[in-house]
Every structure is written in structure tokens, then in C-alpha cells.
Amino acid sequence: MWIGIVGVVYWLVLAKPLIGLDAIANWGLFALIPALTVPWWLIAAPKNGLRLGRALEVG
């Protein structure tokens, strides 16, 4: 779930206007990957012993 949190933080706090290959790379890394990973994890990933709340635990 951390990849989703990284995407949200990037777009809310760190994003800046880019052009060219930088824009494509940023979009792929911080929008496309989290947008595909989070639903995949929720629907299809093996979660033996994992809970959604574990992503928020420290340590």
C-alpha cells in the first residue's frame, strides 16, 4: 500500500510542471504504477497473514 501513499504525496505536495520525457516518466512512476498496483493488491495479490492496517504500523 505504500506505493499508493507515495503517489498521493507526490501529486499533492511534490509535483511540478514538467515537459517531455520527464513528464512521461513522472506520470508513469507516480500515477500509473500506484493506480495499477493498489487495485491489484486489493483484488488479486496473495495476502496470507496480511491486513490492510499492517501498512500503517511502524517498526
Image (cartoon, rainbow, N blue to C red):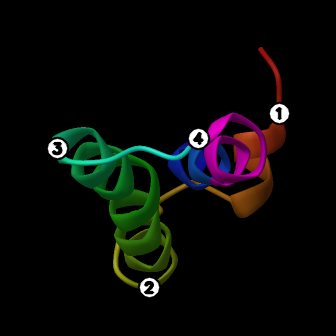
Name the disc covering residue 17, or none. Answer: none
Front in this rendered view, residue 22 or 6: 22
Dot 4: element: loop
Disc 3 is placed on an element classified as: helix
Label 4, label 3: how far apart the Cα atoms are: 14 Å
Q: Is residue 52 left or right of residue 19?
A: right
Given the image, on which type of amino acid does mark 3 rest?
A: Leu
Relative vertical location of residue 44 with respect to residue 9 in this rendering, above or below:
below
Judge from the rendering whether residue 15 lies leftward or rightward of residue 13; answer left or right.
left
Cβ–Cβ under 8 Å for marks 1 and 4: no
Residue at left 82%, top 33%?
57
Q: Amino acid at mark 2?
A: Ile
- Say which of marks 1 and 4 sits in front: 4
Q: Closer to the N terminus: mark 1 or mark 2?
A: 2
Instruction: Please tell me the numbered disc located at residue 57.
Output: 1
Q: Which residue is more in the foreground, 57 or 20?
A: 20
Q: Residue at x 20, y 48 (%)?
A: 20
Q: Which residue is mark 4?
A: 16
Is residue 10 inside the magenta stretch?
yes
Which amino acid does the dot numbered 4 rest on?
Lys
Determine the secondary structure under disc 2: helix
Position of residue 36 relative to residue 15, above or below, is below
Q: Which residue is mark 3?
A: 21
Looking at the rendered image, the disc whose residue lies closer to the viewer, 2 or 3, is 3
Question: Outermost residue toward the bottom?
Answer: 43
Q: Which residue is mark 2?
A: 43
Describe residue 30's horizontal placement relative to residue 46 as left or right: right
